[in-house]
């Protein structure tokens, strides 16, 4: 297969400009995707465009990751229902420093023939002269043309409308494409399907100003069959930064993929070949309870983003906590697995004479009173370090902690608390 056929079988082509398949087959192209620097980390929603660039690179094309140090000061209205808060230059620069290492996990910046490039559009946008921009770029776009773009039309239907700042975003992105065309010979821009208007505006600008031919390809917006927004969980957004989303939580996100989505996600987010994915699809259809496809997806995605060591730790924590039990886990594995679980601190002195387990449950917030905690124990609903508490008169001491400083409390199957013991 050529790269365009690769994109097609992986269901990654939502739309493309005429002649793109032929252009990709004819010669190596330089292609770019823009990444939003509104946070110091990318999230799993950024993985599909990252994988798109990586696939192009593996087929001999040169990828450019453009971080929007300039456009990030304004904000893209595409896919947004309201204008977001504007960031300062310092905030954008700080966010860019967090994003680069994540791009380096997926793209090869040291490739001999076609190394990936990381470009900041602040290099040409921040020094841009307003009068020159209006004269050299603005004159090539009519207001009617801009109003027809889906991202603009959708925002105009909202009560608050769209500010001139965001209205001008389309021109800035088109100017990005022109600059990349001039500086790096870039003739292909990719993005989500909500970027189609911005991308084709760039193609039009290159044609009008340079007489050149440029192309666009837009990827489908990733959705979950369950109706839950992709990349969102009860604990919040799934980030690529391990400081925001632990590798364990990241691994669990993929492991919990709906059966209806897992094959599509294997195509999107892994480099597994067609035969391997087809085999996993067959196993998933015949024995969905084994969740083999989900396990492979979780392994591949976690290894890609966090590396082999983090994957091994996440798998170990998963096995210990869900198969062997929390008592056998290390403190690191427990804290990694339950990073989103509420916790409290108790001083070591409070446990010297012992503490009733019902009082501990109240202190941890699993019961409103000692009597409620007593009823919880009598009903078999309170667990300490994964063992059911059967006696409401039970007293706990430091000897009952895990690793000498940690209690794990559970109410039923879902409500959890960590109690950390402090010294002094």
Image: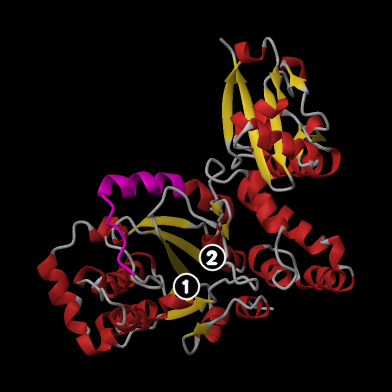
Is residue 221 left or right of 166 when viewed as pictured?
right
Task: Name the mark on residue 190.
Answer: 1
| Figure quadrant of the C terminus | top right
Is residue 49 left or right of 367 when viewed as pictured?
left
Q: Nearer the viewer, residue 204 or 337?
A: 337
Q: Is residue 87 magenta?
A: yes
In the rendered image of this protein, does residue 284 appear above or below residue 96? below
Q: Looking at the image, can residue 142 be seen?
A: no
Range of the magenta residues?
A: 82-99
Q: Earlier in the sequence, mark 2 or mark 1?
A: 2
Residue 254 screen position, x and y as percent = 68, 58
Query: How many numbered marks are there?
Result: 2
Kindly indicate whether the residue at mark 1 contacts the one at mark 2 (C-beta within 8 angstroms). yes
Q: Is residue 209 magenta?
A: no
Q: Residue at x 48, y 78 (%)?
A: 193
SS for dot 2: helix
Q: Nearer the viewer, residue 18 or 363?
A: 363
Residue 299 screen position, x and y as percent = 73, 53
Residue 415 screen position, x and y as percent = 66, 44
Q: Residue at x 22, y 68 (%)?
A: 165
SS for dot 1: strand
Q: Nearer the viewer, residue 379 or 416?
A: 379
Spatial CA distance of label 2 from label 1 is 8 Å
CA neighbours of label 1 inside 10 A, class few (<14), some (14 to 19), many (20+):
many
Q: Which residue is label 2 attached to?
A: 53
Residue closest to the far left? 131
Residue 353 screen position, x and y as percent = 69, 10
């Amino acid at each position: 297969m050529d790269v365009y056929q690769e994109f097609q079988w992986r269901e990654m082509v939502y739309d493309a400009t005429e002649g793109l398949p032929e252009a990709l087959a004819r010669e190596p192209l330089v292609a770019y995707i823009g990444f939003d620097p509104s946070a110091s980390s990318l999230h799993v929603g950024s993985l599909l465009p990252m994988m798109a660039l990586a696939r192009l690179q593996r087929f001999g094309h040169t990828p450019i990751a453009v971080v929007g140090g300039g456009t990030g000061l304004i904000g893209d209205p595409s896919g947004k229902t309201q204008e977001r808060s504007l960031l300062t230059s310092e905030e954008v620069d700080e966010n860019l420093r967090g994003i680069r290492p994540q791009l380096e996990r997926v793209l090869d910046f040291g490739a001999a023939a076609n190394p990936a490039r990381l470009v900041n559009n602040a290099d040409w946008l921040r020094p841009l002269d307003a009068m020159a921009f209006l004269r050299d770029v603005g004159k090539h776009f009519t207001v009617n043309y801009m109003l027809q773009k889906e991202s603009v039309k959708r925002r105009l239907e909202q009560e608050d409308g769209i500010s001139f700042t965001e209205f001008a975003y389309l021109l800035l992105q088109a100017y990005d494409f022109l600059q990349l065309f001039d500086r790096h010979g870039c003739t292909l821009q990719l993005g989500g399907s909500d970027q189609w208007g911005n991308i084709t505006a760039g193609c039009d600008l290159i044609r009008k100003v340079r007489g050149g031919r440029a192309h666009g390809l837009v990827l489908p917006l990733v959705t979950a069959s369950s109706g839950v927004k992709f990349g969102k969980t009860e604990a919040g957004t799934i980030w690529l930064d391990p400081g925001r989303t632990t590798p364990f939580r990241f691994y669990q996100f993929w492991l919990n993929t709906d059966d209806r989505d897992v094959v599509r996600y294997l195509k999107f987010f892994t480099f597994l070949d067609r035969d391997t994915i087809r085999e996993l699809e067959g196993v998933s259809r015949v024995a969905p309870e084994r969740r083999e496809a989900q396990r492979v997806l979780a392994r591949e995605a976690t290894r890609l983003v966090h590396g082999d060591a983090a994957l091994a730790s996440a798998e170990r924590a998963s096995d210990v906590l869900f198969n062997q039990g929390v008592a056998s886990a290390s403190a690191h594995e427990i804290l990694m697995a339950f990073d989103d679980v509420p916790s409290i601190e108790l001083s070591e002195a409070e446990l010297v004479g012992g503490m009733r387990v019902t009082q501990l449950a109240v202190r941890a917030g699993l019961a409103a009173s000692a009597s409620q905690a007593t009823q919880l124990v009598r009903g078999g609903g309170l667990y300490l370090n994964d063992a059911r508490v059967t006696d409401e008169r039970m007293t706990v001491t430091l000897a009952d902690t895990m690793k000498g400083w940690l209690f794990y409390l559970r109410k039923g199957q879902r409500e959890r608390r960590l109690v950390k013991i402090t010294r002094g």
